[in-house]
Amino acid sequence: MLAFVLRRLIQAVLVMLTVAFIAFMLFQYVGDPVTNILGQDATPQQRQQLRADLGLDSPFPVQFARFVGNAVQGEFGLSLRQGRKVSSLIAERLPATLELALLAALMALAIGIPMGVYSALKRGTFASQALMTVSLIGVSLPTFLIGILLILVFAVTLKWLPSFGRGEVVAFGPWTTGMTTIDGWRHLVLPAVTLAIFQLTLIMRLVRSEMLEVLRADYIKFARARGLSDRAVYFRHALKNTLVPVVTITGLQIGGLIAFAIITETVFQWPGMGLLFIQAVQFADIPVMAAYLCLIALIFVVINLVVDLLYFAVDPRLRVERAAAAH
Amino acid sequence: MKRIAPWLLTVAFACTATLSHALTLRVSNQGDVGSMDPHSLNEALQLSFDINIYEPLIERDKNMGLVPALATKWTQTSPTVWRFDLRPGVRFHDGTPFTADDVVFTFKRAAGDGSDMKGYTNPIKEVRKVGELAVEIETTAPYPILPDTLTTLGMMSKKWCEENKAEHPVDRRKGIENTASFKANGTGPFRLKERQPSVRTVLVKNFNWWGKVDGNVDEVVFTPIGNDATRVAALLSGETDLMEPVPLQDVERIKAAGLNVLQGPELRTIFLGMDQKRDELLFSSVKGKNPFKDVRVRRAFYQAIDEETIKSRVMRGAALPTGLMVGAAVRGFQADMNKRLPYDPEAAKKLLADAGYPNGFEVGMNCPNDRYVNDAAICQAVAANLARIGVKVNLMTETKISYFPKILRRDTSFYLLGWTPSTVDSHDVLSSIIATPNEKGQGQFNLGAYSNPKLDELTLKIQSETDQKKRNDLIREAFKIHQDDVGHIPLHQQALAWAFGKNVQLTQLPNNYMYFKWVTLKSM
């Protein structure tokens, strides 16, 4: 067990280093922040001086080594655009993104699973066909379009919900939340729905097909033969077995929700990490971009690690397979 | 009909939205104000916002004229020395009195490390305290436009800066944050109440302000909304009162919704430049010589461009075609000379043939796609126009972050640029854009290195000529030479567009500064 965990940790470190390297290499091509930092009236000497002071003129390996050395200590320097510590910028923005992603994930699960079960059990009825069609739209419409449409309907036409921002937030130490005020909730609804729709339809379709699969299994037939009620068959036996892959997918999707909330955050001016990242890209704010990519990679690596460990604990078959594969 | 329940819930939420009695102006902009520090970045949005908190010695009135702000009077005591009498009884927001020490300190700060305002302080040799409420500014050479350059420099408190370790603007190189980036203590009509970068910034009225407020706003909430559609939606739904810039395609829609759109010409002139220095262009089919060295070719390019169509199609009317490199609000603008060469593809073809290119040639063109209004589309239109006279343009459009370093290295043959004279004076354009590039920073943005020694001489004279009439004649002469040479191809001044609710009354300046003290909110 310990050897397995260690091996996974080493792999995780390698993945992180690779991501950092690729990210850092990409930054060589995003352009030069110096023109943005200095105004139009700066002299070439001033530009050259700043480039040297920021370390942008050292060779690539030197820049990279310096970067990794600082990153390990959680230090990414000052944002070129805002002149503030990148670590505190990210700490400020993290709660907004996590709140949004978690609410979206909860919505997706709470609505997606029942819808999936329903459309599996009532296969062929009009209602379940309608659900399937609607879900197809949910899967295929791009997020920004859904966001804009929701804004158009609920903010501009009906004027029920706000179109941008987080509204009133309450701070608990370093953590800020909009979930304790009505204004905060009103601001959460549209972005959370926008972010949830894709996941919701994905989960619904996944649950449906898994459920159909499980319902064909022998043990369901035996359960019926024993004379168990439909309710017990569907929800105690079938649904439980359906949920194993759903839980796995959801875990991984949470990482995706956090990382790819970028579009939703841009559309709703949601002050989370995605928006921070986009603003950084537009300015070639390299420290912020590097920190963001590394953090997202870390989130994925940690989630994967946890999922792997859970498998390891839950499924005895894996232990055998992994031992075999490790030769 | 189960769906109705959550809808009703949201209606209930909407009704409980707080109603505030203070008059709050909610403003949104495409980007955030970079910093609260008035010296850290020489950029229009930041200067415009911070000037509501930090006041300069001299400021602009609603017609861009100069009026006293923190200085009540200024006189030139010798060609290089100016005396400024400071306004008595002014206090900073923290209560400290404003004195000559603060002025001396501010100029030192603006000229020091980390400051982006050095362009304004460079001509200044020394700032001396000559009394508790008087200073003298000595320039290195006669500098008649000194008062103009002072209008963008906000005065800071010496005591406050020292107490908060903000004697210098934030130095990104040293990795130490700076209080002045997110706190503020000025003398202006508004005080900073709350600052959440990229989320919201709140200003409240300074009831102890020395001046008379020509508006009634008690509080200003500034929110950056990057996405165009969302920014428009927030205005239409009444969540914001005022926003800029307005995407051109939404102007009609906003007007149709019963809101106001105010469009005025900006100071910025959009123009094309051509490499006239290299003996062979970097990106062209012509080898062994540089076609742009021939004035007939430059003239042919000029006459081939259909600016009126660019104005009506690409800019949807929101542009002012120009024959000069400066707009109407800039000192030295010559109304009678503001005529473009006529659009005439036939004449252009003939000029090209006379110059030895009857079948045209190929040339590479560089263009930004996220810096000016519809910049990439303008370049596409120009390329299409030039195709008609046989010139094949290989257009390369890219983001400003990669575009500017490239053209500043002069890795270009043909490019598009926009320029706002920060002093609102023609000399700025002559010296930055038109003069021959030299070691002293002259012609720094003359990226095609257009050069005419006569013009350089005039530019130097204009810099130190103090007689306004003579100076204007010199500027006239300089512009005439530049027009005859077709040194650059001016296209237009893009329009500023602000949109706001029916309850808002305001004043728009051509430098795009937004003074909240001039905003009046009517009750509806």
Image: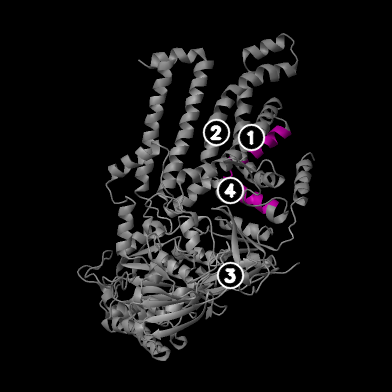
Q: Is residue B353 above or below residue B160?
A: below
Whether label 1 touches label 2, CB < 8 Å: yes
* Residues beneath discs 1 and 2 located on the same chain: yes
Regarding mark 1 in the picture, which secondary structure is present there? helix
| Magenta range | A126-154
Element type at mark 4 = loop
Determine crowd level at label 1: few under 14, some 14-19, many 20+ residues with C-alpha closer than 10 A: many
Q: Is residue A28 left or right of residue A153?
A: left
Q: Which of pointers 2 and 4 indicates the residue nearer the eye? A: 4
The Cα atoms of the two marked residues, 1 and 4, are separated by 20 Å
Query: Pointer 3: what residue?
Result: B515
Residues packed near mark 3 inside 10 Å, few (<14), some (14 to 19) or many (20 plus): some
Q: Which mark is residue A108?
A: 1
**What's the residue at 65%, 67% (across, down)?**
B207
> Does residue B474 sit above or below B405 in this rendering?
below
* Mark sitting earlier along the chain (2/4): 2
Q: CA distance from mark 1 to mark 2?
A: 11 Å
The amino acid type found where label 4 is placed reads Trp
- Verify CB contact (< 8 Å) between mark 3 and mark 4: no
Task: Say which residue label 2 marks.
Answer: A253
